[in-house]
Image: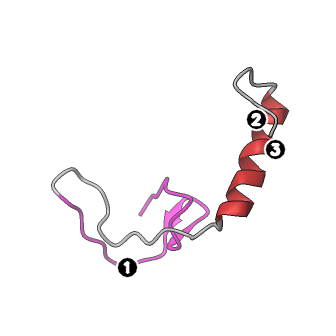
Amino acid sequence: MNCDNFLCVYEKNGECSCSEISLDILGSCTDCIYVTIDPETLAALKKKTLKSLGDDCFLED
């Protein structure tokens, strides 16, 4: 089964590794488990990405 949620632990190479899943009323997977990213790592990755984009919204600390 295809999966576009790359933050889900069950996603691998665009595919869901679960044999069966359940969907909610909106069609979203109810079995999804998100990878936890600690706040410091997330902040560093956001900063790096904004810098590489040359984003005008980027503000130095």
Q: Which residue is label 3 attached to?
A: 48
Secondary structure beneath dot 3 equals helix
Quarter-wise, where is residue 52 in the image?
top right
Label 3 CA crowd tier, 10 Å (few <14, some 14–19, many 20+)? few
Q: Secondary structure at mark 1?
A: loop
Question: In the current view of this chain or complex, which residue is farthest to the bottom?
Answer: 19
Q: Where is residue 42 drawn, in percent x and y?
A: 68, 57
Q: Disc 3 vs disc 2: Cβ atoms closer than 8 Å? A: yes
On screen, residue 12 versus residue 55, left or right, reads left
Under mark 2, the amino acid is Leu
Residue shown at 31%/76% (left/top)? 20
Residue 31 among those drawn in magenta:
no
Up the image or down, 53 lies above or below 25; here it is: above
Image quadrant where residue 48 sits: top right
Residue 1, given in percent of the width and then of the height, sits at 41, 64
Q: Decide: marks 1, 3 in contact (CB < 8 A)?
A: no
Give the extent of the magenta segment.
Answer: 1-24
In the image, 7: left or right of 59?
A: left
Amino acid on which the number 3 mark rests in the picture: Lys
N-term mark: 1 or 3: 1
Residue that badge 2 annotates: 50
Q: Amino acid at mark 1?
A: Ser
